[in-house]
Amino acid sequence: MAGEHVTFDSGPVRGELEVPGDKSISHRALIAGAAAVTSLRISGLNAGRDVRATRDALGALGAVISSDARAVTVARAALRSPRTALDCMNSGSTARMLLGVCAGANLAARFDGDASLRRRPMEPVAAQLRAFGARIETTQGRLPLEIRGTPQIETRHFILLRPSAQVKSALLFAALFGGVAVQIDGDRGSRDHTERMIGHLGGEIEWGGTTARLGARPLDGGQIDVPGDFSSAAFFITAAVVTPGSSVVLRNVGVNPTRIGLLEALREMGAAIELRRPRAWSGEPVADIAAEHRSLRGCRIDAGMALRAIDEIPLLAVAAAFAEGVTTVDGASDLRTKESDRLAAIGRLCESVGIECANEGPRLVISGGAPQSRGGAVSAEGDHRIAMAAAVLAGGAGPLSVDSADSIEVSFPGFLEAWRRRGRG
C-alpha cells in the first residue's frame, strides 16, 4: 500500500515530550460514555483516525457527542440501528468493540472498513457474540459483516480461546448495553483498560489475570482523563535507548502493567529507563518516563512479556538490532494479522540495515550488531507502527526513506514534527 514518502534522519532524542492521548483508552471512553446514565466528559481524547472511526460510528448509532477546546462530552441517548454501513476505517478496535455494543443494545448494523481491515479476522469475536445471542454473518470470517443484536441473552459465561482484550471488551460492552451480568474466563493478562474504566465509572466489576466478572449495575457518567499513549511514547523511549547522546523524558504517560512489556524487555537488555512521579488518572497508572542511551545485550522475551508488548514488538526488534548477541521473541505469530504482516515488515526493516532476522514458527530471532543504513527505502505497507519504527531505526542507523508516512495519522497526529524537533531539547 503506497502513500506519502518521507526520509527519516539520524540523531539523538533529547529534552521533554508529550504524546497524544492513549488510543485504547480513548476508544473505550467513548463507548462507555454511550452506556453511562449521565454525561461523560473526556479530556485528552486521542485525535487520530482510529478513534475518529469509533466516534463517527457511535454517532451513526445515535450517541450524542460534542466537543469544546478542552474535552469531548458523550451525553446519554437512545441508540438506534444505523441507516448506512458503519465505516470502521483501519480500526480493529472500532469493529470488534462496537460489535459488542450492537449485540447488547439489540441493534442491526453492517460493518465495513478499508482494505487492510477487511483482511483482519473477525470470527473470534463473532463466535463469542453469537453465543451471547447475536446473529452475525461475516465474509469468510472477515469484514464486511452484518449483525443483528438480541433482546434474548443466551450465554452469560464465556471462555476466551486465546487472550484478546478486544474480544473480552466486546463481551463486557455487550453485557453493559444488554443490562446483564457476565463472567469471562481464559484470559492471560491481556489489556485491562475496559475493566479499570468500568470500575472508575461505578460499574460492578472484578478481574484478575484470568477472569473478569461484571454485574448488571449501569455506569455513572462524570470525568475521564486520558493519559498519554504508551504505544506512542514507546517510539521516543526506544529511540533514546538505541541512539548515542540521547536523554528524554516523556510526560504524563499511561503505564498500565498490561501495556509496558516493552519497558520490561528493554530493561532485560540493559536499558536505562526510570518511571518518575507515579500517580493515577481515572483508574489508570500514570508516570513520567525517563530514558537514555546505554549499550544493550540480547535476551529472551517470553510469550507473556510479548503479549504485554504486542504493539511494540517492531520496536523490540529495532532495539534487538542494536543489541550485542541474539534476541528471541516468543508468541509473535499474531503479528501476521495486524494492520500489515508485521513479521514480514520487521524482516524488511532489519534487512535494510544489514541485520539478520528469522522467523521460527511463532518465534522471532534477531542477531544484533551494528545496524548501518544503506540509504534505501523501506515499505511500511500502510502500517503506522512500522512507519514510525523505521524512524526509530534511522535515528541510530542512518537515514531511511519509508512510504505510507501518511498512515501515521491513524494513531499519532504530529509525529513527523515531533520527530524533526526531537534533538532540540
Image (tube, helix red, strand yellow):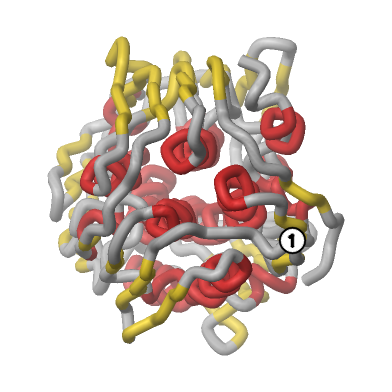
**Residue 410 placement (x, y as % from top left):** 68, 47
Disc 1, SS? loop
Q: Quadrant of residue 66?
A: top right
How many marks do you count on the picture? Answer: 1
Residue drawn at x 57%, y 79% is: 142
Q: Quadrant of the N terminus?
A: bottom right
| Crowd tier of the residue under label 1, counting other residues whose Cα lies within 10 Å: few below 14, some 14–19, many 20 or above | some
Residue drawn at x 70%, y 47% is: 408
**Residue 353 placement (x, y as % from top left):** 58, 64
**Residue 315 placement (x, y as % from top left):** 46, 52
Depth check: 150 or 291 in front? Answer: 291
Depth check: 298 or 207 in front? Answer: 298
* Looking at the image, residue 262 lies above or below residue 381: above
Q: Quadrant of residue 147?
A: bottom right
Residue drawn at x 67%, y 57% is: 88
Depth check: 256 or 322 in front? Answer: 322
51 sits to left or right of 98: right
Q: Quadrant of the C terminus?
A: top right
The answer to whether one can see residue 305 in this image is yes
Residue drawn at x 27%, y 52% is: 297
Instruction: Please state which amino acid type lies under the numbered disc 1.
Output: Gly
Q: Which residue is mark 1?
A: 375
* Looking at the image, residue 57 lies above or below residue 68: below
The answer to whether one can see residue 174 in this image is no
Depth check: 45 or 65 in front? Answer: 45
**Residue 86 placement (x, y as % from top left):** 71, 58
- Name the residue at the right extreme: 4
